[in-house]
Amino acid sequence: MATSKPRTSSFSRNLATVTSSTPGLKYGPNGTIFISSGIPDLDKILGGGFPLGSLVMVMEDAEAPHHMLLLRNFMSQGLVHKQPLLYASPSKDPKGFLGTLPTPGSSKDDKSRDRDPENENGLRIAWQYKKYFSDNQHHFDSNRDVKHEYCHDFDLRKPLEKHFISGQHIDCVSILDSPNLAALRDHCATFLAQFPRNASSISSAGRIAIQSFCAPQCTYSNMEWDMLSFIRSLRSMVRSSNAVAVVTFPPSLLSPSFSRRWQHMADTLLSVRAIPDEDKEMAKLLTGYQDMVGLLNVHKVARINTQVPVILDTTTFSIKLQKRRFLVLESLNQAPIDSSSGTSYGTSASCSGSSKTGTLDF
């Protein structure tokens, strides 16, 4: 008698499982699996990080290379988690860029933020209930350690140690002298073939980092339709794989219509902008202006396996270097109103136009 197979619905989703030994992966809602951006604050803003199968695009600022901060942390985080990396750059020696990647570090503020006072001297509960938690205490500690290892704080002053780079699958490609994008497309297809989306379990995830895709020194920089076709094919290949691609590009070098098309193709769209050194008006409006090195705008957040949009409380964040080492993102806060620059806090409103201060006059 033949054994009958269990009947499954055609609408059921086959979700891949993440093994406990796989570092750098985290489950999200609706079966979404995230990898870290390498910046803890950016992971929180995006709801967990970059979803697998998504295309992330970063619009550069012509006045400052702040996009390199995001790209370096993204690449370093993947190498620390031993995730294969494909890096494409318009430079002659893209491997030399690996020497500028930051190394994992820790700051005092992060330690104080992660420290839980209830865990320093054991569970502060009634003594008669402690026996119920003793068996699971080791399990809780291990889960807490895994969560902290998902994203690191990188010290921008120290280069990444050699043991993170040596012996790993790192493919560096120069797009400087490429007459067209066929070679780069083949490199991406070969790289992404290692991480099929239909696998039952995920043992590793891939990362693709493409720097200054439409740089003027590239031969194909004037082929706007070919570049748009590459972005479309890259998004299709990434969507069917367990990988994330981050592409930075200067929108000022594109025509407005093609720039909008590129932005529409992105799952997650970010932009960076430099802050002038002597902008007195902005210094009056924003608190902590002297500590800012740039601004980060979140234009679009990737939504995988769902159609519910993400509504952020704020879309503009300040880029700061904590202790001149660690990259920090903070919401913009308006400076208190000073009596010398306008209406003070003690001034009361009057609907009748009276100049007296005190009770409201209607």
Image (cartoon, rainbow, N blue to C red):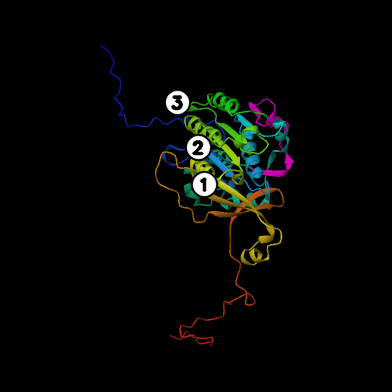
Q: Is residue 155 magenta?
A: yes
Q: Mark 3 against mark 1, which lies toward the viewer?
A: 1
- The percent coordinates of residue 340 (x first, y second) are 65, 77
- Vertical placement of 37 versus 333: above or below? above
Label 3 vs 2, first from the N-terminus = 2
Kindly indicate whether the residue at mark 2 contacts the one at mark 1 (C-beta within 8 angstroms).
no
Q: Which residues are magenta?
A: 153-176
Q: Which residue is mark 3?
A: 200
What is the distance, in whole Å, between disc 1 and disc 2 at their CAs? 13 Å
- The percent coordinates of residue 215 (x first, y second) are 65, 39
At 66% from the left and 44% from the top, the residue drawn is 69
At 56% from the left and 41% from the top, the residue drawn is 57
- The percent coordinates of residue 216 (x first, y second) are 66, 39
Q: Which residue is mark 1?
A: 46
What is the distance, in whole Å, between disc 3 and disc 1 at their CAs? 26 Å
**The quarter of the displayed image where residue 213 is located:** top right
Residue type of the residue flagged with mark 1 = Leu
Q: Decide if residue 261 is on the left or right side of residue 157.
A: left
Label 1 vs 2, first from the N-terminus = 1
Q: Which residue is mark 2?
A: 54
